[in-house]
Image (cartoon, rainbow, N blue to C red):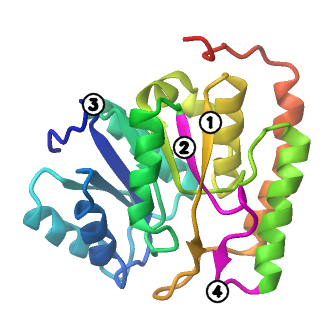
């Protein structure tokens, strides 16, 4: 990967993909075109629609700035990110971001998340749909309400001072991912996002929410379903319960 630097910080964006041929090239180009020179790491779960071939074309066009990890099947969003985190740490990145492939997260907002972590010194920056109200465009009202109240519920149960607990648009400083027990993260689906934030919170890392506007995908098919939210809603009780019997290291003063 490239030696991209800004005040010495090398940054990468991890993008899981499954059947994203309509979005793959465009999202990679959008990230590479930003003023902060992010690299891109794609995790592809053996997409049958040829997504990986498109990514490899971008690798050839942008040597050292785009890479791919190909897995043998759909192994879950959580394991995709854990795989990406480990590779990013191995490759020496200082700022490690995650985002969706479908433009529901505006790539330009990566600049704001990068600034909060690399420049302002936060440990985790969350692109938040709910920190200033409800900033979601083109979602059915039922889905908006389900997502919004699920995050409220998680906030109450876990005690996290975070409004968008299920957000998938996040940047981490390297030290967070080095400290967290990545192999112990249990959730595989979208509840993975809750568990990562909860664990970072319990470790005392500084977490900052940055307001974004979330736009429903235009191309391709959503991977979201009610079962995913069910995992988030019911899994947090176990997450909170288990935390009562653990002693967490304190990174708040480090």
At x 61% / y 26%, what residue is drawn?
Answer: 205
Task: Label 3: state its secondary structure.
Answer: loop
Q: Around disc 4, counting alpha carbons within 10 Å, would you say few (fewer than 14), some (14 to 19), or many (20 or more)?
A: few
Q: Which residue is mark 3?
A: 92
* Residue 45 showing in the rendered view: no
Tell me, yes or no, whether the two marked residues, 4 and 3, touch with CB atoms within 8 Å: no
Tell me, yes or no, whether the two marked residues, 1 and 2, touch with CB atoms within 8 Å: yes
Percent across and percent down for residue 195 are 69, 42
Nearer to us of marks 3 and 2 is: 2
Q: Which residue is mark 1?
A: 207
Residues under labels 1 and 2: Cα distance?
6 Å
The disc, 1 or 2, on the residue closer to the chain's N-terminal end is: 2
Task: Label 4: state its secondary structure.
Answer: loop
Of 55 and 50, the residue lying toward us: 55
Percent across and percent down for residue 194 are 70, 47
The disc, 2 or 4, on the residue closer to the chain's N-terminal end is: 2
* Residue 47 showing in the rendered view: yes
Percent across and percent down for residue 97 are 43, 48
Range of magenta residues: 124-140
Q: What's the mark number on residue 125?
A: 2
Tell me, yes or no, whether the two marked residues, 4 and 1, touch with CB atoms within 8 Å: no
Of 254 and 236, the residue lying toward us: 254
Percent across and percent down for residue 99 are 47, 59
Residues under labels 1 and 3: Cα distance?
22 Å
The disc, 1 or 3, on the residue closer to the chain's N-terminal end is: 3
Task: Label 2: state its secondary structure.
Answer: strand
Tell me, yes or no, whether the two marked residues, 3 and 2, touch with CB atoms within 8 Å: no
Q: Which residue is mark 4?
A: 138
Residues under labels 2 and 4: Cα distance?
24 Å
């Amino acid at each position: 990967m490239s030696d991209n630097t800004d005040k010495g910080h090398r940054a990468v964006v991890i993008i899981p993909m499954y059947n994203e041929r309509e979005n793959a090239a465009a999202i990679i180009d959008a990230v590479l075109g930003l003023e902060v020179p992010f690299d891109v790491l794609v995790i592809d779960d053996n997409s049958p629609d040829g997504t990986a071939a498109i990514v490899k074309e971008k690798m050839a066009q942008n040597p050292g700035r785009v890479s791919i990890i190909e897995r043998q099947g759909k192994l879950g969003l959580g394991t995709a990110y854990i795989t990406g985190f480990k590779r990013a740490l191995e490759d020496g990145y200082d700022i490690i971001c995650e985002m969706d492939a479908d433009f529901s997260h505006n790539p330009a907002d990566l600049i704001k998340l990068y600034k909060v972590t690399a420049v302002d010194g936060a440990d985790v920056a969350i692109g938040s749909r709910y920190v200033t109200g409800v900033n979601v465009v083109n979602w059915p009202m039922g889905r908006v309400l389900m997502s919004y109240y699920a995050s409220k519920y998680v906030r109450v149960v876990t005690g996290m001072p975070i409004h968008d607990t299920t957000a998938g648009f996040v940047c981490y400083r390297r030290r967070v991912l080095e400290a967290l027990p990545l192999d112990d993260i249990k959730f595989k689906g979208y509840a993975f996002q809750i568990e990562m934030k909860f664990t970072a919170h319990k470790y005392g890392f500084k977490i900052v929410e940055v307001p974004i506007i979330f736009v429903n995908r235009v191309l391709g098919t959503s991977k979201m379903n009610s079962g995913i939210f069910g995992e988030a809603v019911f899994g947090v009780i176990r997450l909170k319960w288990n935390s009562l019997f653990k002693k967490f290291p304190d990174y708040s003063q480090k």
